[in-house]
Image (spheres, rainbow, N blue to C red):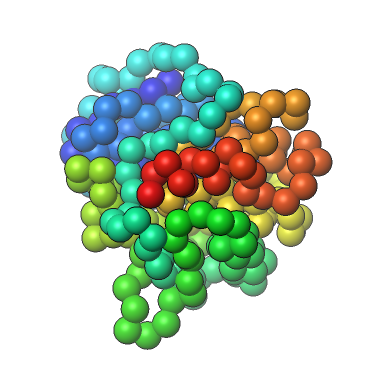
């Protein structure tokens, strides 16, 4: 199900089995495996969430073909600049395991040759990625939310929120948690989901468990790198 939302934000979710995207501001259509409308309306950080937006989601839902498995996919929004320093701030609600995973996921992007750098926030710096954690009775491991205008993030900021029950069943699996974090930072960069198989394109933006169950090695992979290069 795809949803086109006018004057609303985007929410991208990392489930244990699937990832869900919602329509993004003024950018046409964004893809996902299901809507999860109830969750999006109750999230405290959801951008411009309202009954009117819910109605818009329901009225404009449409089915479309999944993206091709052969190349990265952009979601249409990005940070300003061509080589930005992006400060991420881990909130006090984030537990130890997900705090470690967040730092490791940012580090994975910094370890490859892509534009931009994710840097731990320090006093006086802007917050470009806010990291939070909460407990939701839902099926996602983490969610990335943002709003944008003319292709740029509002306030040059995105939010990544971990779901502490780990409903996808990855528990304390450090590799899986790190890959979820790398995946969410990929959304922050501007990447959308990819559909692939163990024998297909290696990408950290694949939905669900494929990225750590296929023995591909360490993320991100060349297709992810190509995507960030294309965005910035």
Name the one closer to the observer, 53 or 120. 120
Q: Is residue 102 in sight in this rendering?
A: no
Please give left or right for residue 147 compared with residue 90 in the image. Answer: left
Residue 197, horizontal then vertical, whole percent: 70, 26
Number of callouts: 0
Q: Is residue 203 in sight in this rendering?
A: yes
Residue 159, horizontal then vertical, whole percent: 40, 57
Quarter occupied by residue 108: bottom right
- Seen at 56% across and 63% down, the residue is 110
Please give left or right for residue 174 compared with residue 15 in the image. Answer: right
Residue 80, horizontal then vertical, whole percent: 28, 56
Image vertical order of residue 201 relative to residue 140, above or below:
above
Quarter occupied by residue 221: top right
Name the one closer to the observer, 28 or 20. 28
Quarter occupied by residue 125: bottom left
Name the one closer to the observer, 71 or 103. 71
- Seen at 66% across and 57% down, the residue is 178
- Seen at 43% across and 52% down, the residue is 188
Residue 4, horizontal then vertical, whole percent: 28, 27
Image vertical order of residue 7 relative to residue 111, above or below:
above
Image vertical order of residue 18 relative to residue 124, above or below:
above
Please give left or right for residue 147 compared with residue 221 in the image. Answer: left
- Seen at 62% across and 49% down, the residue is 220
Residue found at the very far right of the displayed protein: 215
């Amino acid at each position: 199900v795809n949803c086109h939302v006018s004057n609303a934000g985007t929410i991208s979710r990392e489930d244990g089995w699937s990832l869900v995207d919602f329509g993004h501001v003024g950018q046409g259509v964004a893809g996902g495996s299901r809507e999860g409308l109830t969750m999006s309306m109750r999230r405290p950080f959801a951008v411009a969430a309202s009954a009117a937006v819910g109605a818009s989601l329901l009225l404009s839902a449409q089915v479309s073909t999944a993206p091709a498995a052969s190349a990265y996919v952009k979601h249409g929004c990005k940070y300003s600049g061509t080589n930005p320093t992006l400060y991420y701030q881990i909130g006090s609600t984030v537990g130890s395991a997900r705090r470690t995973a967040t730092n490791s996921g940012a580090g994975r992007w910094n370890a490859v040759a892509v534009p931009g750098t994710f840097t731990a926030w320090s006093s006086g710096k802007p917050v470009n990625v806010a990291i939070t954690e909460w407990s939701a009775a839902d099926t996602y491991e983490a969610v990335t939310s943002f709003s944008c205008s003319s292709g740029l993030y509002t306030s040059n900021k995105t939010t990544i929120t971990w779901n502490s029950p780990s409903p996808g069943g990855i528990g304390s699996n450090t590799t899986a948690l790190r890959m979820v974090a790398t995946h969410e930072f990929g959304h922050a960069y501007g990447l959308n989901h990819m559909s692939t198989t163990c024998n297909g394109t290696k990408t950290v933006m694949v939905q669900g468990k494929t990225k750590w169950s296929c023995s591909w090695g360490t993320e991100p992979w060349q297709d992810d790198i190509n995507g960030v290069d294309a965005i910035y």
